[in-house]
Image (cartoon, rainbow, N blue to C red):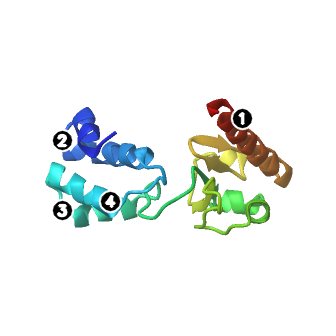
Amino acid sequence: MTVSRIVEKHGNNRENLLQIMHDIQDAATDRCLHRDVLDELSDIMNIPVADLVGTATFYSMFSLTPRGRHIIRLCESPPCYILGSDNILEALRERLDIGIGETTPDGLFTLEHTSCLGACGVAPVMSIDDEVYGNLTTGKVNAIIDQIVENQIAAARNRK
């Protein structure tokens, strides 16, 4: 979907900017907001590129650099930390062989920290894309990653 179609879908009003930027980012294969796309959006909506970049860098859900197909966000709030998010981070680092802010070489996963996912009652917590996972253990983390990888393999087979 083109930038102009996304803007047309939501309406060319500044109050729709966040949803427009989400849709543009979701449409990008590398899940980021590229400079040329921000230039085009600026022209269409008559919003300075600096404002668009400021918006993109303020909200953690946006990225100006390429990211993986699946975004893993590990909560680093005090409840999650107290209940073992550091162990979960170590399990993710070992399993994916990446650190915070990095993407796996196959482009499947990007690992990020987030300040809170609003699920403190089931800490430690992480989200992958729009799904929240709680009461995490290292075993659960590996099972979740295994399932996503298996789903990717099955989807690739079905496309053939």
Q: CA distance from mark 3 to mark 1?
A: 43 Å
Q: Closest to the observer: 112 or 1?
A: 1
Q: Residues within 10 Å of mark 2 (few under 14, many from 20)?
A: some
Cα distance, mark 1 to mark 2?
Answer: 39 Å
For marks 3 and 4, give the CA distance: 11 Å
Distance from Cα at disc 4 to Cα at disc 1: 37 Å
Query: What's the distance in space between the residues labelled 3 and 2, CA to CA?
Result: 14 Å
Spot occupied by residue 149 in the image (x, y as percentages of width and height)? 73, 45
Q: Secondary structure at mark 2?
A: loop
Give percent across and percent down for residue 130. Answer: 56, 41
Query: How many residues crowd mark 3 within 10 Å: few (<14), some (14–19), many (20+)?
Result: some
Question: Along the horizontal axis of the image, is 87 left or right of 128?
Answer: right
Q: In the rendering, which numbered label is found on residue 154?
A: 1
Q: Nearer the viewer, mark 3 or mark 1?
A: 1
- Find residue 69 and name its label: none
Which residue was labeled with disc 2? 12
Above or below for 90 versus 132: below
Choose the circle earlier in sequence order: 3 or 4.
Answer: 3
Q: Quadrant of the C terminus?
A: top right
> What residue is disc 3 on?
48
Which label's residue is closer to the chain start, 4 or 1?
Answer: 4
Image location (x, y in percent) of residue 104: 65, 61
Residue 147 in view in this figure? yes
Tell me the tag on residue 55. 4
- Say what amino acid the circle numbered 2 marks: Asn
Q: Is residue 136 visible?
A: no
Q: Residue at x 18, y 62 (%)?
A: 48
